[in-house]
């Protein structure tokens, strides 16, 4: 966000606060979607990255990946059609699945992540009388999905499950891939899997794939060239034999850049030759993927409370408000004329930080969540919320 926009937020709402720039989000999504649609690829938003953006994402993606009953309820409140949901997750509770299938008459797509889930979905379909569309998730070597052999077995014996409509496969191996070499290997392997399934009498209609594109969170990272990245990826897809539908499941990549976290320096301590700046945020609010031991420098705007000139640069250890020595956001961050009352704007926090921090620790309040756009201005989406009642038996 531009500094004048941030100043508007600070004048009205103060800190700590998350601000999500919906104009920046729309610009990025239009660019990504436009490039991918040239090769007939669609987007699926993994809403765990930032559930607050679910409604804002609706015009730009074909699907939403839902991994919990709570995420499903968010989509219901946002009036996202169930047909556009991929109901995923390693723990699918029978009562939740039965409710969804019954209430929405089998609409939506469900992932199969185990033999138990295959049975669960089959039983729900038979009990309700509704056909269910499914994707078989192939594991990349972790607790998610089934191995390739079991996936092939399920697909080639699908006649045993006439109540299920097998749409294809889902594969996701991780995030923050800094080159496309692993992506190339994965696409080749998935292409071979689909060809093998075809030879065994089953056509894989759809591949839902998580490319895990990298977000350059830190000053030491190479900056992104979005057009070049998307073009190189499209070339890899064009080399595939697979002719079915391809949907790219993304969470972090499209939304990280639209988010900022605003926090104020509330105290300065000079201890044994080190400067410690205490801010009203902390590690319960900020979570950069790959931020090991607070040694990497994220992108931060420094908004000074005065405009004094010729001030020296100092290296600050920026620490949060939690009573734990682990609450160090970044070490040795360079600030010119840093002082109590200044605001720090941590950028590229549109993904995960708003929900992934240890928000209930020390019973501190949850920060405000704000949207910004030229059309709507500043919108308060969630006000500051107390957590002490959640953390005690006295409601």
Image: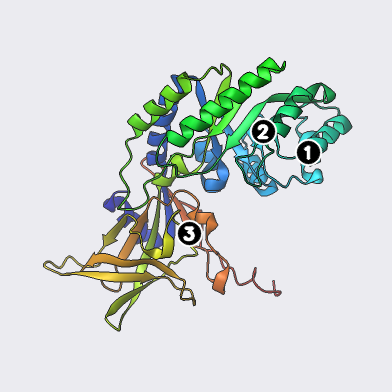
Residue shown at the point (72%, 15%) measured from the top left? 201
Tell me if mark 3 has few (under 14), some (14-19) or many (20+) residues whose alpha carbon lies within 10 angstroms of its own: many
Marks counted in the figure total: 3
Q: Mark 3 points at which residue?
A: 368
* Left or right: 157, with 22 as reference point: right
In x, y percent, where is residue 216?
36, 47
Q: Name the residue under label 1.
A: 115
Res 60 seen here: no
The quadrant where residue 141 appears: top right
Between disc 2 and disc 1, the foreground one is 2
Res 150 seen here: yes
Please tell me which of labels 2 and 1 falls first in the chain: 1
Please tell me which of labels 1 and 3 falls first in the chain: 1
Please tell me which of labels 2 and 3 falls first in the chain: 2
In x, y percent, where is residue 128?
86, 31
Q: Which residue is the extreme one toward the left?
A: 310
* Left or right: 146, with 212 as reference point: right
Between disc 2 and disc 3, the foreground one is 2
In x, y percent, where is residue 26?
41, 36
Query: Judging from the image, what secondary structure is the residue with disc 2 in?
Result: helix
Q: For this rendering, which residue is in front, 194 or 320?
A: 194
Q: Mark 2 points at which residue?
A: 148
Residue shown at the point (52%, 61%) measured from the top left? 357
Residue shown at the point (39%, 50%) measured from the top left? 348
């Amino acid at each position: 966000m531009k500094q004048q926009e941030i100043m508007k937020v600070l004048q009205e709402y103060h800190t700590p606060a998350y601000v999500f720039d919906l104009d920046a989000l729309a610009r990025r999504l239009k660019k990504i979607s436009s490039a991918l649609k040239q090769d007939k690829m669609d987007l699926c938003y993994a809403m765990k990255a930032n559930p607050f953006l679910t409604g804002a994402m609706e015009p730009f993606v074909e699907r939403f990946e839902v991994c919990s009953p709570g995420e499903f309820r968010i989509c219901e409140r946002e009036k996202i059609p169930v047909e556009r949901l991929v109901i995923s997750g390693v723990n699918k509770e029978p009562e939740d699945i039965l409710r969804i299938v019954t209430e929405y008459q089998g609409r939506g797509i469900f992932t199969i992540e185990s033999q138990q889930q295959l049975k669960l979905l089959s039983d729900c379909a038979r009990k309700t009388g509704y056909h269910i569309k499914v994707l078989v998730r192939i594991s990349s070597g972790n607790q998610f999905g089934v191995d390739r052999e079991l996936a092939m077995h399920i697909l080639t014996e699908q006649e045993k499950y006439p109540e299920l409509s097998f749409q294809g496969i889902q594969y996701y191996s991780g995030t923050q891939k800094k080159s496309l070499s692993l992506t190339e290997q994965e696409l080749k392997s998935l292409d071979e899997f689909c060809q093998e399934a075809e030879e065994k009498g089953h056509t894989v209609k759809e591949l839902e794939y998580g490319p895990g594109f990298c977000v350059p969170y830190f000053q030491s990272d190479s900056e992104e060239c979005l057009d070049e990245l998307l073009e190189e990826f499209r070339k890899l897809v064009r080399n595939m034999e697979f002719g079915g539908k391809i949907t790219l499941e993304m969470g972090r990549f499209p939304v990280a850049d639209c988010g900022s976290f605003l926090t104020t320096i509330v105290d300065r301590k000079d201890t044994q030759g080190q400067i410690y700046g205490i801010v009203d945020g902390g590690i319960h609010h900020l979570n950069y993927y790959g931020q090991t031991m607070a040694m990497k420098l994220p992108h931060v705007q420094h908004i000074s409370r005065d405009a004094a000139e010729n001030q020296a640069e100092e290296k600050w250890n920026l620490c949060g408000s939690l009573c734990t020595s682990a609450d160090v956001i970044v070490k040795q961050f360079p600030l010119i004329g840093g002082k109590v009352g200044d605001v720090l704007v941590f950028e590229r926090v549109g993904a995960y930080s708003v929900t992934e921090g240890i928000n209930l620790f020390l019973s501190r309040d949850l920060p405000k969540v704000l949207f910004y756009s030229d059309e709507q201005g500043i919108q308060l989406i969630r006000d500051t919320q107390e957590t002490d009642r959640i953390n005690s038996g006295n409601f």
